Image (cartoon, rainbow, N blue to C red):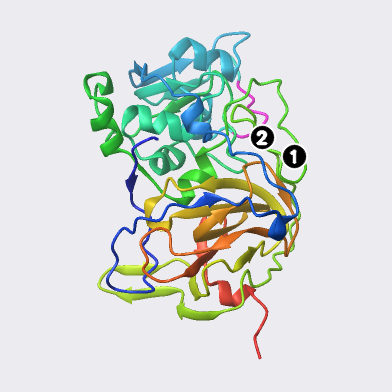
Amino acid sequence: MLLLGVTACIPPARDDYAPPPPQPQLLTDPAVLGTVPEQAPLSTWQSKPATADAQRVESGTYIVQPGDTLRGIANKTGAGSQIIAAANGLVAPYIIRSGQRLKITGGRYHAVNSGETGIAIAQAYGAPWREVVALNALEEPYILRVGQKLLLPDSTPIDPSNMSIEQRAAAFSLDIDDIVTGSQPALADSADTGEPSEWRKAITPNKTVVVSAGFSGRFLWPVDGSVISSFGSKGGGKVNDGLNIGVAKGTPIRASAGGVIAYSGDEIGVFGGLILINHGSGWVTAYGHADKLNVTRGQEVKAGEVIGLAGESGYVEEPQLHFEIRKDRKPVDPKIHLPKRG
């Protein structure tokens, strides 16, 4: 199991958090599900570790030569083509002309290899993935391409190869946004994204998963229970990015809307058993503190389908569901988007 730090916002249903012993299990009760799901594969960032072999590029100016392309200039200079385009105000289809002077942004660049994920790259350098996303202006669907050069943050250790695995793991942290933006494995330029799988059939970690666009933004309550912690600031620096809903242990958790499973696992300790569903159009829902999980990455689910059972895994001491709705990577108040209750 990969050792990860935790920077996720603690959903403060209580003020006396302590890491509990229960770990989520894969749901296997045929009476509840009808079909026993397959064992979930390794997380995408565990199956293909990245190598910290970034190359340093000096800042400067490049004069465009006849026949040059943006990709070719990136290869010549070692800088990323997207970084060059952004630094010089170039937009698709990135037309350049002979004699044009282009600013080259210096720094250390990592060349993406086949199957690498953003999370694996960040872990290799002990760098925050969210900073890499911002620095390189990465956008949905956050699929990296082989050969793409990613500019690393200045805060990245100068030589991660001199750090032990434990030191790099301690310097790396993981939150929900990292999984949403950095869990897809890199593809070759000519490769297409994969289709969502049939129900309860796992997608192998070396495959990307496409999510359709056009989601309307309509959601259902994932469980029927009382809200024990609402969205927003709780004082003392604590912020709840969603709702905590009190329910009995073993309560079925239902997909709030149709979509594709982006994650199912327990790598973010504060949430315990966690499921993320990507609905497309920038919408993502999160379901935390699950006692049992019955979905794996890449599965297509419909609104109302059971995706797991509620519990008290993670940093809580009573059964509950932590539920989030995110739009364009930012948490929004779920109550605004859920049906009114009588």
Is disc 2 in contact with disc 1, using a CB cutoff of under 8 Å?
Answer: yes
Residue positioned 48% across, 20% down in the render: 101
Q: x and y percent of residue 188 in the render?
A: 64, 20
Q: Residues within 10 Å of mark 1 (few under 14, many from 20)?
A: some
The circle drawn on residue 203 is 2
Find residue 342 and report its image quarter: bottom right
Q: Is residue 95 magenta?
A: yes
Question: Which residue corresponds to the image point at 33% horizontal and 37% vertical from the top-left?
Answer: 3
Q: Specify the label residue 197 is tagged with.
A: 1
Rendered location of residue 5, percent (x, y):
31, 45
In front: 25, or 221? 25
Asked whether, in this view, residue 180 is left or right of residue 279, the answer is: left
How far apart are the alpha carbons under marks 2 and 1?
7 Å
Residue 121, compared with residue 315, is above or below; it is above
- Can residue 88 be seen here? no
Between 157 and 226, the one nearer to me in the picture: 226
Indicate the position of residue 98 as horizontal and vertical percent values: 58, 14
Front residue of 287/71: it is 287
Q: Spot the residue most to the bottom.
A: 342
Mark toward the start of the polypeptide (2 vs 1): 1
Kindly identify the amino acid type of the residue bearing the numbered disc 1.
Answer: Ser
Quick check: 106 left or right of 296? left
What span is colored magenta in the figure?
A: 91-96
